[in-house]
Image (tube, helix red, strand yellow):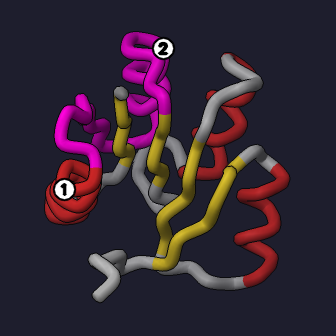
Amino acid sequence: MKLLIVDDSKFTQKVEGNLFKEVVPNLEIYFANDGKEGVQKYIEINPDLTIVDLLMPNMTGMELLKEIKDIDKDAKMVVVSADVQEKVKQEAYDLGALAFVNKPINKAK
């Protein structure tokens, strides 16, 4: 299984990558530092799941969701963001997000 994490924070990339690796040990994890790089990596690796931050330079997470859905209508994407406004969540769902997870994420105890 291939996972693409698109987030401009190296710390967040590491935390999310480690959490997923614990659950799916054979997971192939790829990282992108902004939305534009995220689109390029998506095309290059065709991940099974993409984790998307919303606030990034060069291309926002919302723009990324739209761009990827234009490329692949079956893309599976989850938004991870500290922005918990209901209208933001709804926009993400309208653009094709499967789920919206609040930051910071951590292991359930």
Amino acid type shown at disc 1: Glu
Which residue appears at 31% of the width and 37% of the height?
Answer: 32
Residue 41 magenta-drawn? Answer: yes
Whether pointer 1 and pointer 2 mark residues with C-beta atoms closer than 8 Å, the reply is no
Residue 54 percent location from the top left of the image: 52, 60
Q: Secondary structure at mark 1?
A: helix
Give the answer, above or below, for where 34 lies relative to 22: above
Give the answer, above or below, for where 74 lies relative to 32: above
Q: State the residue position of label 2.
A: 43
Residue 103, picture quadrant: bottom left
Q: CA distance from mark 1 to mark 2?
A: 26 Å
Badge 2 crowding class, 10 Å Cα cut-off, few under 14, some 14 to 19, many 20 or more, is: few
Give the answer, above or below, for where 36 lies relative to 10: above
Q: Nearer the viewer, mark 1 or mark 2?
A: 1
Amino acid type shown at disc 2: Ile
Residue 13 percent location from the top left of the image: 23, 54
| Magenta residues, start to end | 24-48
Q: State the residue position of label 1.
A: 22
